[in-house]
Image (cartoon, coloured by chain):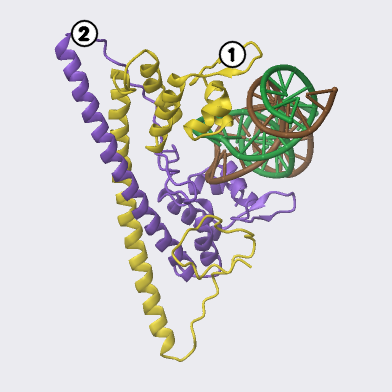
Chain colours: A purple, B yellow, C brown, D green
Amino acid sequence: MRIGELAERAGTTTRTLRYYESIGLLPARRTGNGYRAYDEDDLRLVRQIRTLQDFGFGLEETRPFVECLRSGHPDGDSCPASLEVYRRKLAELDDCIARLSDVRRQVGAQLARAEQARAALEAAATVPGGAPEPRCELTPYDPSYDPSASDVAAETTPRG
Amino acid sequence: MRIGELAERAGTTTRTLRYYESIGLLPARRTGNGYRAYDEDDLRLVRQIRTLQDFGFGLEETRPFVECLRSGHPDGDSCPASLEVYRRKLAELDDCIARLSDVRRQVGAQLARAEQARAALEAAATVPGGAPEPRCELTPYDPSYDPSASDVAAETTPRG
DNA sequence: GTAGACCTTGCCCCTGACGTCAAGGCCAGA
DNA sequence: TCTGGCCTTGACGTCAGGGGCAAGGTCTAC
């Protein structure tokens, strides 16, 4: 099949598939006229990649799974390198969740303190204020708390 | 004070302060020769920004706090807009933690399943007597796989 | 009067995962 | 033959938060 069909069947875009090829993740054979040619195995590779991406894996982290599938294994996680990525990802997730929980606690404490201070002020002088319009922009969570830690989970990017 | 001193006292760089000015977060007065001039209040603003950044706030999210300080309040979170940012951040954190926890659960399940499948395979392969020796950790086109992998004692990354 | 530290603006670079043109090639149907 | 759709490569933009360097201006100390 050609790139348009693969993109449609895999639920992605042609631009994405060309990008995968450009980083060596999904090489494509070519037909006589230069068009990319894919088969059902390539469709499975793309689906494996997208599944892992939904888990927040970066593209580089999907590489062992893709290689595993391409070498003939029935599942992308049948190989030790894939299991290692799983384990590293679990450790990253645990670390990330712990840090976020700590930040949540601190921000919650700051909010409580500031709200109490405001309540005290407003009790002193009752001043009606306008409702602050909340911005509806979705700001993604920032995993770069530690600049040397590889990041995880870009779930808030509208990809799906 | 000039930009170099402010950067040093705030624990950041001159480049960062110029960047803040370029996005309108920290405007600077100018001396006759064009140098940026800052005072102690600006130092407090920068420290407020850095504190919030340590919590994972984006620069845009620090803006209400900075403007609150600049309008004369003793704390950056004395204003309703700042409180609103706190609350939105808390909601984001809760959402993010929930999603990451769910992903963690799913990845953990995948790992357990894949490990069991491998154990079964190796048990079956050991009975005939050959070493399993899977060859899927080869990643031929990958000069630098994970430059920032911290620990986990990654032994299955040959990388060359 | 000059060395050297500090300042200015401006420009290109990086990450990740693509989106969005632009200019042109290939092919099937009317 | 024309039209329209799909394909190609290439280049630039995005978002955040700056890093790094160049060319040149300014100030201070010796």
- Three-letter amino acid code at disc 1? Arg
Q: Relative to the observer, which residue lies in front, A30 or A135?
A: A135
Query: What residue is shown at x 54% (from left), y 69% (from top)?
Result: B137
The disc label shown at residue A113, or none: none
Numbered disc in front, either 2 or 1: 1
Query: What residue is shown at x 52% (from left), y 33% (from top)?
Result: B8
The reply to whether label 2 and label 1 mark residues of one chain is: no
Label 1 environment density (alpha carbons within 10 Å; few <14, some 14–19, many ≥20): few
Q: In the drawing, does residue B66 fall left or right of residue B78?
A: right
Residue B109 occupies quadrant: bottom left
Which residue matches tag 2? A128
Q: Position of residue D23 (x, y in %)?
A: 80, 27
What is the residue that sits farthest to the left in this orientation?
A123
Residue A49, compared with residue B78, is above or below; it is: below
Q: Position of residue A60 (x, y in %)?
A: 54, 55
- Three-letter amino acid code at disc 2? Pro
Q: In the drawing, does residue A43 fall left or right of residue C5?
A: left
Q: Chain of mark 1?
A: B
Residue A148, compared with residue A40, is above or below; it is: above
The disc label shown at residue B30, or none: 1
Residue A110 occupies quadrant: top left
Q: In the drawing, does residue A144 fall left or right of residue A15?
A: left
